[in-house]
């Protein structure tokens, strides 16, 4: 009860902040944004004159509550995350249902579109855990890494099968009406196994995944130009990184392709390093 009471207090605080920002934005005029509002792409935008304020446009947008670290939250509350226990999965769904219910109540009260988003929090995932680590110390499974887990995801380091990961995360998609993603991490070039790729897509569809992604390594040797999967030795020319020129390793992070891993911040770089590959047999999942 104490947990939900405090969660509700924080949602009330965020709601007030969202409304304050909304009112500030609504006070602006159409003429303040000639490019954005001159393209005819905003709902009701063609009905406004340059001197009109923006409320009639912005009311169609969303005011969103984001969250990260559900897995660590569950570890703190009952000692297991949603990938480890059905009890934790049940509690995790109850927590997000609470958030969604509160957001829906705000929508009815204010006649605005409040929503819940499964946030990756590219920078905040590392910042928040460092703040908590300074307060509570290094707690196993909670603050002992350089990042909090993306939204409702099963922790990236936890060995789990493709089907189980999708099964666990799918119910949260229906609750997070502001946005969500579930990804599967594969080892190797997906073009070499199209059947497996299609099987994963079908499992996602049948499970109710709203937005799914399949990650696989894409490496490049800047010396010979080889593109594909490079482990320690380039299949194209046979050289190693000991020759002085590093291989380019392109990875997806938080739903985006941002280039090579050296462009990630420290928290997301640590997360990428910890990721295990998801297979159709969890026992075979390895770094």
Image (spheres, rainbow, N blue to C red):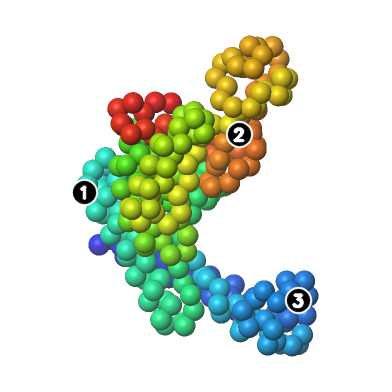
Instruction: Report the residue at 61% width, 34% height from top.
Output: 250
Residue 6 makes an appearance in the image: no
Q: Which mark is residue 87?
A: 1
Q: Nearer the viewer, mark 3 or mark 1?
A: 3
Percent across and percent down for residue 230 are 57, 22
Instruction: Report the residue at 77% width, 71% height from top.
Output: 35
Q: Nearer the viewer, mark 2 or mark 1?
A: 2
Q: Residues within 10 Å of mark 1 (few under 14, many from 20)?
A: some
Instruction: Report the residue at 45% width, 49% height from top.
Output: 212
Does 36 sit above or below residue 279?
below
* SS at circle 2: strand
Q: Is residue 193 left or right of residue 42?
A: left
Q: The N terminus is located in which quarter? A: bottom left
Q: Quadrant of residue 228?
A: top right
Q: Which residue is mark 3?
A: 38
| Residue nearest the viewer, comparing 163 with 132 | 163
Q: CA distance from mark 2 to mark 1?
A: 37 Å
Q: Which mark is residue 250?
A: 2
């Amino acid at each position: 009860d104490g947990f939900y009471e405090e969660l509700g207090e924080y949602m009330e605080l965020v709601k007030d902040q969202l409304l304050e920002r909304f009112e500030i934005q609504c006070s602006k005029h159409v003429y303040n944004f000639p490019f954005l509002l001159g393209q005819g792409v905003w709902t009701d935008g063609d009905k406004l004159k340059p001197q009109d304020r923006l409320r009639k446009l912005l009311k169609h947008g969303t005011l969103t509550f984001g969250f990260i670290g559900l897995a660590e939250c569950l570890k703190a509350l009952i000692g297991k995350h949603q990938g480890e226990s059905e009890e934790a999965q049940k509690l995790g769904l109850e927590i997000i249902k609470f958030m969604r219910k509160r957001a829906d109540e705000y929508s009815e009260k204010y006649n605005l579109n409040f929503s819940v988003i499964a946030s990756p929090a590219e920078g905040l995932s590392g910042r928040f855990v460092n703040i908590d680590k300074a307060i509570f110390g290094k707690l196993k499974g909670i603050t002992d890494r350089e990042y909090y887990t993306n939204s409702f995801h099963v922790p990236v380091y936890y060995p789990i099968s493709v089907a189980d990961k999708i099964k666990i995360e799918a119910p949260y998609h229906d609750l997070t009406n502001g946005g969500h993603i579930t990804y599967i991490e594969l080892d190797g070039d997906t073009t070499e196994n199209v059947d497996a790729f299609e099987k994963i897509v079908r499992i996602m569809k049948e499970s109710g995944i709203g937005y799914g992604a399949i990650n696989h390594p894409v490496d490049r040797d800047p010396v010979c130009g080889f593109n594909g999967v490079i482990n320690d030795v380039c299949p194209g020319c046979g050289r190693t990184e000991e020759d002085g020129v590093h291989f380019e390793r392109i990875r997806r992070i938080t739903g985006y392709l941002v280039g090579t891993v050296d462009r990630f911040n420290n928290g997301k770089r640590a997360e990428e390093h910890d990721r295990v590959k998801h297979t159709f047999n969890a026992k075979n999942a390895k770094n």
